[in-house]
Image: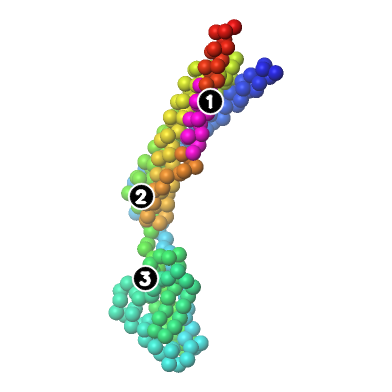
Amino acid sequence: MKENVVKKVNGFGKIGVVVGHVCRGFSVVAAIGILLFSIGSILLAGKLGDVEYYNGVKWTLNLASFDEEDREEILSEIMESIENDAEGNLVIQESELKVAKGEVSLAVQNDDMSVVSAEYDEENETILIDTRAEDINIFMPLKVVITTICVILTAVAEVITFTFVIKLCRKFKTCETPFSQPIVNDLKKVTLSLIPWCITYPLLEASLEMMATNRFAFSLDLGLIFVVFAINALTYIFRYGAMLQQESDETL
């Protein structure tokens, strides 16, 4: 029974070594690829063109569906606000499109929108209004640099962790018992190497979000922190098992 368990531990170690090498290699290749892509993006920024997009909505207000008195007042309010206010005077609210006397509001992802253009079609009695939020340039050099740094930091953390995992699995591959001090030491190193992940991964997610939204929102990953605590607890379990194994060996 004991020999069968040890064989399974050894088999787990063999698989772990292979998987660890694959994951470490993938991290290195991905980091190098993204680094080269980022350097190219910065050097060629503006030469081959930029990638920009905006959160915008075009919508048509059919004035013919309103009473003539309301129609004139709505038209007057909209055209006057556009003419007098460069930012536009449409209000974004957490609700659907609302049209009332002298008031037009539109809900678009809770973002403040500004009026880009408005055209009044007298024949069809409609107003075509184009609204948009802040323009976003995905390949802005500063964004690319920050994201690349976060990618490299994440890749370095991954390579360090996978290196310790490979060393741990090699010991599992040849061990006669998993409860030994060398295995406990390597498991502790794996645990410590995971701590930077709790910072680098949220940083990477925040930088990627910044590329698309212009907002850098950092938040800790509680799930990842829990994994670190769980593996740390496992380390103490193995340490206790190693102590019992040592006492048993000394008794025999």
Q: What residue type is labelled 2?
A: Lys
> Which label lies toward us, 3 or 2?
3
Q: Which mark is residue 143?
A: 2
Which of disc 2 and disc 3 is earlier in sequence? 3
The residue tagged 1 is 237
Q: What is the quadrant of the N terminus in the image?
A: top right
Against 50, is 108 above or below? below
Mark 1 falls on what kind of element? helix
Q: Where is residue 20 in the image (x, y as percent from the top left)?
A: 53, 29
Which of disc 2 and disc 1 is earlier in sequence? 2
Which of the pair 241/42 is nearer the observer? 241
Q: What residue type is labelled 3?
A: Ser
Query: Is 10 colored magenta in this rendering?
Result: no
Q: What is the quadrant of the C terminus in the image?
A: top right
The residue tagged 3 is 114
Residue drawn where x is 29% and y is 79% of the image: 84
Q: What residue type is labelled 1?
A: Ile
Q: For label 3, count other residues whose C-alpha is less than 10 Å away and answer few (under 14), some (14-19) or many (20+).
A: many
Q: Position of residue 19 (x, y in %)?
A: 56, 30
Distance Cα–Cα, label 1 vs label 2: 44 Å
Residue drawn where x is 55% and y is 16% of the image: 244
Which of the pair 245/206 is nearer the observer? 245
Distance Cα–Cα, label 3 vs label 1: 60 Å
Distance Cα–Cα, label 3 vs label 2: 24 Å
Residue drawn where x is 39% and y is 73% of the image: 91
Against 133, is 203 above or below? above
> Which label lies toward us, 1 or 2?
1
Q: Position of residue 218 (x, y in %)?
A: 39, 48
Residues drawn in magenta: 226-239
Mark 2 falls on what kind of element? helix
43 vs 178, left or right, is left
